Each structure stands twice: as structure tokens, then as C-alpha cells.
């Protein structure tokens, strides 16, 4: 993960440099609620812009596999700046509400806050609260928006700052930016492209609110979509689906997210990299058909070409290996995925948790 850590560090430096150029003229008293790298990036930007963060609320550390992804510590950053920290899973207690009211905040700012927040809490602030969400709302509210968007073949993703409301992820929009998605971009690629927008848009939105220049735009509830957490079932490959759908799933589950997986000779096999063939190989879905220069062609479902080429695979506890080296024998078929893999999560590769 060292390369990933280096990318995050460089990205953070660029974000803070941009924030420094736009030091706020209207400092706000902020209660910040956030978690993981998204929370760290947003909190850093608020502090760099000159806002007074009077309290940080964060979730406790977790050994959950998916909460070890992008797991920079909001608590550690707050302590470095001598900001009081309140740690909890849910932030709806009478004790916290009273504490926030005594602080007389101007605004609540949420970034990767993972549980429902009662309106009575954020209404202790003069201007209520805002949340930063990594999707182009009103579409892709809820969980794992980048992963869902790529799995669904979207051509753009983005980041939205919206007001908190009684309806989850449906408050009025204060700021929004889109990011183009290329045909081979992965969820990891899009994480790094959207991450800088968290700090930038948070600072922009707070400035607009504090100077009275915000022009909230109501979301179209009829166009809204809300997605649940991704689990082992969402990561599993159905070879009856088209090559395009399977390629999108592999892109959506790029490392360090849990990989898309299939069953081969009774064991889980992760697919790390795929591409399309120039030829239309047809037949029974799931059959290892033939070799191309950089991979092995597998027959998929769908009514039209192209076929899918497996480039890199990985056993559940193994290292990545070129598909041409892994599959020594062609003409075999991928197995149906046993239902118990979904129930017990004991054998599905990295599938015992939901994607963030």
C-alpha cells in the first residue's frame, strides 16, 4: 500500500495548496463529523482555510476489513490541532446534543459520517449542516457510490455538497463537481480523482453559506436513487451477463476494494484485470475458450460482442498472476458460486464486509 499512501500524500498537498490560496474571509464555528481519509481531507481543508473547528465527532477505530481501506485518522488530526474529540458510533445522544448547543456553532460539516444524524443535533447550529457525498446527487445516494456507478457503466461521477435534511442524501445542493469516467477507469482511479474535491468543495460551500451567497438547489426526488452496501453477492460474477457488464464489475472492485470473483475448480478466484477482445467468441457462458497475446478469452452471455479477455487473476490468498500463466488448460468452465459462500462469507475472497 506504500504507493497508494504516497498518492494520498501528494494529493493532500495539492488540495491544501489550493485552499491556502482561498483563505476564508468569513470564518465559521464548525462542528465537524467525519471518518477515514475523506474525513481527514475535509477537516484539513477547513482548518487550512481558517475556520474554527470547535468539536470533532468521529467513529471509533475498527478492525472491519473495509474500514481499513483509506483509513487515515480523523481523531489523530484533531488531537494535533488540540480540538476536542467526541467518539461514538451514533451521534444522537442527549449528552452530545447539549454539548453542541453550548458550543453555539455556525455549521455542522459531515464527511464520511456513517450513521443517521437526528435533525435535533445539527439544528443546534445557526445554519444547520452540510454533508459531502461522492456522487452526482440525486443519483447514487447511499453506500459505495463510486463502485455502483462504475459497475453500472456510468460515464461520469462526482462530489456533491448538500444541506442536511430529514431525507438521507436528499437535502438541497450547495456545490457539485463532475469527474469524467474513462472506459477502463477503476474505482481506485476515481477515488483519487474525487478525493481532492472533498476539501475544495467543503471550503467553497462553507464560504458561500457564511457570506450569504449560497443558492441551494432542490434535488429532484423523482430522479433520486439510493444504493445499499455492496457485499459478496455484488462482487460475484454471473457469466450469463455480457462482457461489458463483467468488465465494469471488475473495474468497480479494483484493489484495495474486494475483487470481483468467480469459482474455479471449487475455489474462489479473483479477477483483477480484463479487457475486450476484437473477436466475437460465442458459446456456453463461463467457458475458457482460447488464448490471446495478453490473456485468456472466456465466453460470456449477452446478445452481442465483444468477448472478454482475462488478463490478471488471483487466488483468494495468493499473489496476482497473468491469466495466461494461471490457466494451463483451456476448454474448462467456471463453476457456479455455492450459495453458502454468501451465507457464511468464509470462502468468498475478501467478501466478508461491505464496500465503502
Image: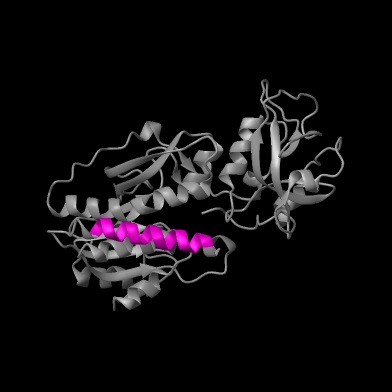
How many labels sit on residues?
0
**Vertical side of 233 occupied by 245: above or below:** above
Span shown in magenta: 3-19
**Vertical side of 239 occupied by 59: above or below:** below
SS assignment for the magenta stretch, majority: helix
- Which quadrant is the N terminus positioned in? bottom right
Residue 32 in sight: yes
Residue 220 screen position, x and y as percent? 33, 33
Q: Kindly indicate the quadrant of the structure image that contains residue 348.
A: bottom right
Q: Kindly indicate the quadrant of the structure image that contains residue 120.
A: bottom left
153 relative to 273 in the view: left or right = left
Can residue 15 be found in the magenta stretch? yes
Residue 144 in sight: no
Residue 112 screen position, x and y as percent? 41, 57
Colour scheme of the rendered structure: one colour
**Vertical side of 282 occupied by 170: above or below:** below
Q: Depth check: 205 or 220 in front?
A: 205
Residue 288 screen position, x and y as percent? 80, 36
67 relative to 44 in the view: left or right = right
Q: Residue at x 22, y 54 (%)?
A: 206
Q: Residue furthest top?
A: 303
Q: Residue furthest front?
A: 293
1 relative to 115 in the view: left or right = right
Q: Depth check: 271 or 353 in front?
A: 271
Residue 246 screen position, x and y as percent? 64, 36
Can residue 168 be found in the magenta stretch? no
Q: Residue at x 43, y 58 (%)?
A: 115
**Vertical side of 176 occupied by 1: above or below:** below
Amino acid at each position: 500500500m506504500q504507493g497508494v499512501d504516497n498518492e494520498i500524500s501528494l494529493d493532500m498537498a495539492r488540495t491544501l495548496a489550493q485552499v491556502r490560496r482561498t483563505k476564508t474571509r468569513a470564518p465559521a464555528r464548525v462542528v465537524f463529523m467525519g471518518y477515514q481519509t475523506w474525513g481527514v481531507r475535509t477537516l484539513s481543508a477547513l482548518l487550512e482555510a481558517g475556520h474554527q473547528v470547535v468539536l470533532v465527532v468521529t467513529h471509533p477505530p475498527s478492525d472491519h476489513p473495509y474500514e481499513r481501506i483509506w483509513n487515515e485518522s480523523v481523531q489523530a488530526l484533531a488531537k494535533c490541532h488540540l480540538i476536542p474529540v467526541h467518539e461514538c458510533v451514533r451521534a444522537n445522544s442527549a449528552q452530545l446534543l447539549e454539548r453542541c448547543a453550548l458550543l453555539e456553532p455556525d455549521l455542522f460539516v459531515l464527511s464520511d459520517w456513517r450513521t443517521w444524524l437526528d435533525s435535533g443535533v445539527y439544528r443546534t447550529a445557526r445554519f444547520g449542516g452540510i454533508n459531502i457525498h461522492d456522487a452526482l446527487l440525486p443519483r447514487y445516494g447511499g453506500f459505495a457510490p463510486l463502485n455502483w456507478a462504475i459497475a453500472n457503466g456510468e460515464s461520469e461521477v462526482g462530489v456533491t455538497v448538500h444541506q442536511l435534511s430529514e431525507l438521507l442524501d436528499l437535502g438541497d445542493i450547495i456545490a457539485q463537481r463532475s469527474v469524467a469516467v474513462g472506459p477502463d477507469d477503476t474505482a481506485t482511479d476515481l477515488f483519487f480523482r474525487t478525493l481532492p474535491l472533498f476539501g475544495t468543495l467543503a471550503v467553497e460551500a462553507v464560504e458561500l453559506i457564511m457570506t450569504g451567497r449560497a443558492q441551494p438547489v432542490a434535488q429532484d426526488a423523482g430522479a433520486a436513487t439510493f444504493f445499499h452496501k455492496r457485499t459478496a453477492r455484488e462482487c460475484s460474477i454471473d457469466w450469463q451477463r455480457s462482457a461489458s457488464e463483467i468488465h465494469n464489475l471488475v473495474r468497480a472492485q479494483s484493489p484495495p476494494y474486494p475483487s470481483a470473483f468467480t469459482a474455479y475448480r471449487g475455489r474462489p478466484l479473483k479477477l483483477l484485470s480484463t479487457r475486450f477482445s476484437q473477436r466475437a467468441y460465442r458459446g456456453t457462458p463461463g467457458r475458457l475458450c482460447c488464448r490471446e497475446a495478453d490473456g485468456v478469452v472466456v465466453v460470456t452471455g449477452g446478445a452481442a460482442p465483444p468477448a472478454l479477455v482475462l488478463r490478471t487473476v488471483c487466488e483468494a490468498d495468493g499473489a496476482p498472476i497473468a491469466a495466461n500463466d494461471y490457466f494451463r488448460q483451456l476448454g474448462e468452465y467456471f463453476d457456479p458460486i455455492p450459495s453458502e459462500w454468501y451465507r457464511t462469507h468464509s470462502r468468498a475472497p475478501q467478501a466478508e464486509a461491505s464496500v465503502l
